[in-house]
Amino acid sequence: MPAEVDTGLATLSDQLILATVLLYIFAMVGYALDLGFGRSKAKAKAEPALVTVGGGTAAAPPAPAQGEGHVDKAPPAWTVWAGPVAVGLTWLGWATNLASILTRGLAVGRWPWGNMYEFVVAICFAAVSAFLFMQIRYPIRFLGAFVTVTAALGLGFAVRYLHVQAGPVVPALNSYWVAIHVSAAIIASGLFIMAGVCGILYLVRKDTAIRLPSRADLDRLAHRAIVIGFPIWTFAVIAGALWADKAWGRYWGWDPKEIWAFITWIVYAAYLHARATAGWKGRAAMIVQLIAFACLLFNLVGVNIFVGGLHSYAEVPG
């Protein structure tokens, strides 16, 4: 490891990542318990209101449907704390994730997203951040199990297959544009991951899955995340072109990374345009959104691993 690297901080960063993975896994278990048991009481309160609105009479409360007698039964006492504990563990994991990024940056004296390992760690942090801060405004705790398991798997993949020792980067990455272009791409990617999770849940959700959020809720949440993330991704693409002009003397060079970043932008734009003009909602819109999400993942990971180009300095271990 280069002499200018603080090995103590670099080791601490790696340890914090492992702690983050464990915290996200424990949080996922808590969210799963909350989703499996904690929503029963809320459903029991909501059921009569839903039937009264849809039915023509409201003279008497409707009898519970067959197989729903368990709704009236209070869940085990310990499940009451599953949701709040899961949220607390997620915030703790978020803090250790942030600390791992900061210690990695301090260890090498640069912005800590100069290779694929650091980039994936930052994207997982952004995805959890999007979930936590949107949860403050919207009741989306039901997504916790799916977001935390996605982040845990992403960090596990980064540790197992992408990890490289902390060190300096190629001269092209020693630029303030890293803080501008890459940061914007990371933030937008975190929001798109949330939308992607909603889209996958939308397509796999069965009508009998009463404990999962409705398809309408998933559709609205995915749309909100993309509406926020799309202009940030647009800015990232523009900032990348400006950086390319400064580094290579041209704004656009048909490099694979540039092409796939633009393809991703086009498909997300198509999704938003279809929603705004054709009134696309539901399954058709989700399929377009997931195509855009697949383009995003290939741009972020696939291009660096499988395709060469000017952006092939991601230091992916062989």
Image (cartoon, rainbow, N blue to C red):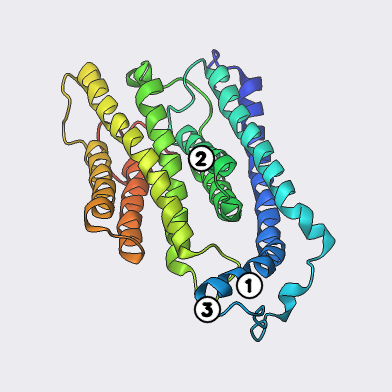
From the viewer's perspective, tell me whether residue 273 is left or right of residue 68: left
Query: Which badge, 2 or 3, comes first in the chain's sequence?
Result: 3
Tell me if residue 258 can be seen.
yes
Displayed quadrant of residue 20: top right
Q: Residues within 10 Å of mark 1 (few under 14, many from 20)?
A: some
- Residue at image x 60%, y 23%? 103
Displayed quadrant of residue 10: top right
Q: Secondary structure at mark 1?
A: helix
Q: Which residue is mark 1?
A: 48
Q: Is residue 214 above or below residue 191?
A: below
Q: Secondary structure at mark 2?
A: helix
Residue 154 image point, x, y percent: 52, 46
Residue 218 image point, x, y percent: 46, 58
Alpha carbon of mark 2 to alpha carbon of mark 1: how far?
34 Å
The disc at residue 55 is: 3
Q: Residues within 10 Å of mark 2 (few under 14, many from 20)?
A: many
Q: Is residue 132 above or below residue 95?
A: below
Quadrant into which the C terminus falls = top left
Closer to viewer: mark 2 or mark 1: 1
Q: Which residue is mark 2?
A: 130
Alpha carbon of mark 2 to alpha carbon of mark 3: how far?
38 Å
From the viewer's perspective, tell me whether residue 114 is left or right of residue 78: left
Q: Residues within 10 Å of mark 3 (few under 14, many from 20)?
A: few
Tell me if residue 163 can be seen.
no
Farthest residue toward the top?
4
Displayed quadrant of residue 181: top left
